[in-house]
Amino acid sequence: MPRISLLEPPYAPDVAQKLKAMMGGQDTDPLSIFRGFVSNMPLASAMGPLGAYFLRNGVAGGPSYDTRSRELVIDRVCARCGCEYEWGVHVAIFRKAARLTDEEIYATVHEDSKAACWDDRDAAVIEMVDNLHDTGHVPDSLFDSLLEHFSDQQISDLLMLAGWYHAISYFANGLKIEHEEWAPRFPQAGTE
């Protein structure tokens, strides 16, 4: 059970509007984590613009990274934080758009940047997340590797994205947000 009560329908008009915006304008059941966010509307309102920014790549005014790199950062951050909830949501919704194979999905949880499935670009992204998670820093040699594949703007967007999903993982884990029924769980080690 979540540690706080997630809002349930019927929602007040401002809450319903915020939840619909969080769901990309779709009239579908909102994610559990979103119902947790709107239980604190000032927080949900403050988070909205930045969260929307991170998912708007490819749109004018959005971040400059590609969908695959975005999802590699998110999946790896969530895996390293042990946030199965958010990892599963992103794998379920964005796996196809990010062109992630079963082997790569497995590696986001159980392997590192040296896994055979990663090309140099993907490996640099995974290593960036791991270094940030473990040390809070990106070594010069790794930053140089990132520069071989990404612009300065893309790197700054990816760094902030990693921090954002660290915060999302803390929220989901800290409140024990229950897993979405349709989202995959972490793969078991040795079952790729």
Image: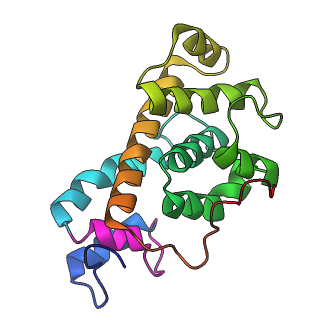
Q: Is residue 35 among the parts visible in the rendering?
A: yes
Corner quadrant of residue 176: bottom left
Residue depicted at x 46% and y 65%: 24
Looking at the rendered structure, the number of numbered marks drawn on it comes to: 0
Instruction: Give the colour scheme of this rendering.
Output: rainbow
Q: Is residue 61 among the parts visible in the rendering?
A: no
For the view shown, which residue lies furthest in the left direction?
42
Q: Is residue 105 left or right of residue 11?
A: right
> Foreground: 176 or 55?
176
- Overall secondary structure of the magenta section: loop
In the figure, 34 relative to 161: above or below? below
Residue depicted at x 56% and y 49%: 79
Residue 186 screen position, x and y as percent: 63, 60
For the view shown, which residue lies furthest in the front direction?
190
Q: Quadrant of the C terminus?
A: bottom right
Residue 84 screen position, x and y as percent: 53, 60
Q: Is residue 97 left or right of residue 63?
A: right
- The boundaries of the magenta stretch are 24-39
Corner quadrant of residue 146: top right
Q: Quadrant of the N terminus?
A: bottom left
In the figure, 155 relative to 97: above or below? above
Corner quadrant of residue 150: top right
Residue depicted at x 43% and y 25%: 135
Based on the picture, tell me whether residue 153 belongs to the magenta stretch.
no
Residue 19 screen position, x and y as percent: 35, 72
> Foreground: 36 or 46?
36
In the figure, 155 relative to 49: above or below? above
> Foreground: 28 or 76?
76
Residue depicted at x 55% and y 14%: 143
Q: Is residue 175 left or right of residue 61?
A: left
Residue 51 screen position, x and y as percent: 38, 50
